[in-house]
Image (cartoon, rainbow, N blue to C red):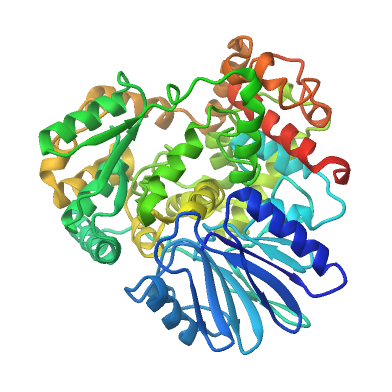
């Protein structure tokens, strides 16, 4: 299922549904299928590139899934019918589930909404839950008055996506992973806490490796049985994509392998070397060289990207030559399953913090403070910004005290970082076709958080895991300067040490100093005035309230500010 939309059946329903249908068409979906209950109306649409069924009915009951769902080892209609039969609110049969999805269930004439364990597939709602959808833009079209959420605007600019449940617009929120909805005359919000183990394992590394390898192997049997070789697999010079390829090979799958980059990139060099040695082709997709476009053609591409990617992609991806859209379609065409190595940092020391307790603010200083407040106007309050971030972090972890054990720090990556960041990509790619992100599965994360920090650092555990699954594949060189059957080299260790042995406060101030010493060059490429001026007012009438746009800005920051300016232009007079 590519997506769905529902609203309360009141005087505004006809207009809302018409606007939402038009927006879903602009997203690229086919004609939707309508549904109604006594209190709500809506519609659902399938993947842009159809594959396994994402809708199943039993009489008047149905289940529609946006994203990718496997249930009790099954996929498609068989999985959906089993889940529909088993469903009772709140849903809690997580050991039976794989995938990231937003589920819409009609049972006994009532609608129910829930997402995957981490809320990795994004579902949006208004303040009263009168409108709920997998489309941010469709929900925005349903509201008469909109305002930017100041905190979320700065989070989007500085971290690539709003954190917690916020979106960049007040009154539109992401459904919390802890929340499930039952929608009738009244809205019932069922709360389902999310907790991960916070105790470090003292078992031998061989035991930990064997257990994880076995668990991943069993998990990959499901998509291997359902998709066979119709699988798209990335391969680069790092850990995660190679581990995905190893698991697919172990399951008997011969996937289509691809790599993004130019011929001289390290990722491409490594991927081609492995492919040549192992006897499989590697598709090289050079996004920069994909297509040359003129400024006159730029506006149509940006408009297409804006609607296809639901307004706010995390990477400034509105402003390209059409390459990212082409790549997303290529991975889903023919009903293929796209497999990703995203979130593979669950096996590593993601925040590069030493093995000791930390405060929640330390995580923010270490990882979320890489910006210069001088790029902001007086509306930015740094103390308030970090206080709000700290509250979001502790809410995600389910703690009140800001003092964290070292293992609680590890849970911040899957509970706080991954759902908004990788979830945005999962939610968008999941519109095109099936998308499997194995390292963001609850069962895998639950075991990974118990790994000792000593095994995380320098990728020690992940190297041994890869070697245990496919030693031949592990033995090829990597972008780190060594293979994954060797000890991490000096260059790798020194590179990690730059972060490991700086305190979080030192990282915050060194990042700020680096910003101030670096003088961004004049905007170039698609950020140059000849291009950007075709799609937004270069005076930035909406964003100049938040940012000092007359300053030379980091290219990535400029892209994200321009993305929000384009959103403001699209929303028009409804944005106050």
Left or right of 474 in this view: 563? right
Where in the figure is residue 221, as x and y percent of width and height? 24, 65
Where in the figure is residue 496, as x and y percent of width and height? 36, 29
Any part of residue 393 in sight: yes
Q: How many marks?
A: 0
Left or right of 311 in this view: 477? left
| Between 194 and 219, the one nearer to me in the picture | 219
User: Which residue is painted at 74% across and 76% down in the image?
Assistant: 40
| Between 45 and 83, the one nearer to me in the picture | 45
Quadrant of residue 356 within the rendered picture: top left
Any part of residue 165 in sight: no
User: Which residue is painted at 64% across and 44% down in the image?
Assistant: 307
| Between 207 and 46, the one nearer to me in the picture | 46
* Residue 102 in the image: above or below residue 510: below
User: Which residue is painted at 33% across and 48% down in the image?
Assistant: 347
Where in the figure is residue 159, as x and y percent of width and height? 59, 37
Specify the quadrant that holds the C terminus. Answer: top right
Where in the figure is residue 501, as x and y percent of width and height? 41, 29
Q: Residue furthest front?
A: 31
């Amino acid at each position: 299922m590519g997506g769905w939309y529902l609203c309360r059946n009141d005087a505004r329903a006809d207009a809302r549904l018409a606007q939402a249908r038009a927006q879903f068409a602009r997203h690229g979906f086919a004609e939707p299928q309508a549904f109604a209950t006594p209190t709500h109306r809506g519609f659902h649409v399938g993947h842009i590139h159809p594959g396994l069924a994402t809708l199943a009915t039993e009489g008047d009951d149905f289940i529609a899934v946006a994203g990718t769902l496997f249930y009790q080892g099954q996929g498609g209609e068989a999985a959906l019918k089993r889940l529909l039969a088993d469903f009772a609110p709140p849903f809690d049969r997580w050991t039976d589930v794989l995938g990231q999805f937003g589920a819409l269930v009609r049972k006994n004439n009532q609608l129910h909404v829930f997402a995957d364990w981490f809320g990795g597939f994004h579902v949006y709602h208004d303040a009263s839950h009168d409108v709920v959808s997998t489309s941010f833009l469709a929900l925005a079209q349903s509201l008469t008055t909109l305002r930017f959420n100041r905190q979320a605007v700065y989070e989007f600019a500085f971290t690539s996506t709003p954190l917690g449940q916020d979106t960049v617009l007040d009154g539109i929120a992401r459904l919390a992973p802890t929340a499930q909805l039952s929608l009738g005359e009244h809205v019932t919000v069922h709360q389902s806490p999310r907790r991960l183990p916070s105790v470090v394992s003292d078992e031998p590394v061989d035991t930990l490796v064997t257990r994880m390898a076995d668990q991943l192997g069993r998990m990959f049997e499901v998509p291997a049985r359902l998709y066979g070789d119709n699988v798209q697999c990335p391969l680069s010079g790092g850990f995660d994509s190679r581990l995905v390829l190893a698991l697919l090979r172990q399951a008997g799958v011969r996937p289509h392998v691809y790599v993004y980059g130019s011929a001289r990139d390290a990722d491409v060099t490594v991927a081609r070397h492995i492919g040549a040695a192992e006897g499989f082709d590697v598709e090289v997709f050079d996004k920069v060289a994909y297509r040359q476009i003129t400024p006159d053609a730029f506006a149509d591409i940006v408009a297409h990207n804006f609607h296809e990617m639901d307004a706010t992609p995390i990477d400034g991806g509105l402003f390209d030559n059409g390459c990212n859209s082409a790549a997303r379609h290529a991975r889903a065409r023919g009903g293929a399953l796209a497999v990703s190595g995203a979130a593979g940092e669950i096996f590593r020391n993601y925040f590069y913090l030493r093995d000791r307790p930390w405060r929640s603010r330390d995580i923010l200083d270490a990882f979320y403070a890489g910006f210069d407040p001088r790029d902001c106007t007086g509306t930015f309050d740094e103390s308030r910004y970090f206080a709000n971030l700290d509250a979001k972090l502790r809410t995600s972890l389910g703690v009140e005290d800001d003092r964290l054990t070292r293992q609680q720090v590890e849970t911040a990556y899957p509970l706080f970082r991954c759902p908004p960041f990788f979830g945005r990509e999962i939610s968008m790619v999941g519109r095109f076709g099936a998308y499997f992100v194995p390292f963001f599965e609850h069962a895998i994360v639950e075991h990974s958080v118990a790994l000792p920090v000593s095994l995380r650092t320098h990728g020690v555990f992940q190297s041994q895991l890869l070697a245990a699954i496919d030693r031949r594949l592990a033995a090829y060189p990597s972008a780190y300067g060594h293979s994954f059957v060797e000890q991490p080299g000096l260059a790798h260790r020194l590179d990690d040490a730059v972060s490991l042995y700086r305190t979080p406060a030192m990282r915050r101030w060194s990042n700020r100093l680096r910003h101030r010493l670096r003088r961004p060059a004049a905007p170039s490429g698609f950020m140059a005035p000849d291009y950007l001026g075709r799609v937004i007012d270069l005076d930035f009438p909406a964003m100049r309230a938040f940012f000092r746009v007359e300053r030379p800005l980091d290219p990535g920051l400029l892209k994200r500010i321009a993305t929000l300016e384009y959103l403001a232009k699209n929303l028009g007079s409804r944005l106050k």
